[in-house]
Amino acid sequence: MNRHTQSIGHLERSVGNDRLTRALAARLDRALTRAGISSARAAKWLGVSEYDVQYWRRGITVPPLNACMRLAAVLHLDVHWLCTGQPPVV
């Protein structure tokens, strides 16, 4: 199974698992905070509402993989880490 498939599977499991959702939200919030990027700015980049990003950061909803991939690229993060919390494979 490749990392892309693993990331998709992890995001899908996160939808029904509060612990996974909160962990993803914490990673996303920490990454955006460290980069000094507001929810409004991230939403503009992604073409979603600011509320969507705020919900992701609070763990209310889970971002789709394409949003995670775009955020990871902009923030210079490994998308697999952002989605799963697992360290990048070097």
Image (cartoon, rainbow, N blue to C red):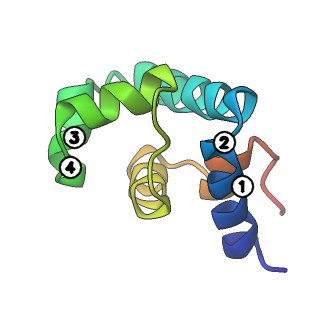
Q: Element under label 3?
A: helix
Label 3 amino acid?
Ala
Q: Residue at x 47, y 60 (%)?
A: 69
Farthest-out residue, front: 16
Q: Earlier in the sequence, mark 3 or mark 2?
A: 2
- Using the numbered discs, state the Cα–Cα distance from disc 3 to disc 4 in whole angstroms: 5 Å
Q: Which residue is disc 1 drawn over?
A: 10
Disc nearest the viewer among 2 and 1: 2
Sequence-wise, which precedes: disc 2 or disc 1? 1
Q: Residue furthest bottom?
A: 1
Residue occupying the point 66% across, 44% down? 14
Dot 2: element: loop
Q: Amino acid at mark 4?
A: Trp
Give the CA separation, mark 3 to mark 2.
24 Å
Q: Which residue corresponds to mark 4? A: 45
Query: 79 or 14: nearer the eye?
Result: 14
Q: Quadrant of the C terminus?
A: bottom right
Query: Pointer 3 and pointer 4: residues touching (CB < 8 Å)?
Result: yes
- Please tell me how crowded label 1 is: few (under 14), some (14-19), or many (20+) other residues with Cα within 10 Å: some
SS class of the residue under badge 1?
A: helix
Q: Which residue is mark 3?
A: 43
Q: Amino acid at mark 1?
A: His
Ranked by sequence position, the earlier of labels 1 and 4 is: 1
Q: Nearer the viewer, mark 3 or mark 2?
A: 2
Image coords of residue 18 (percent x, y): 68, 28
Image mark for residue 16: 2
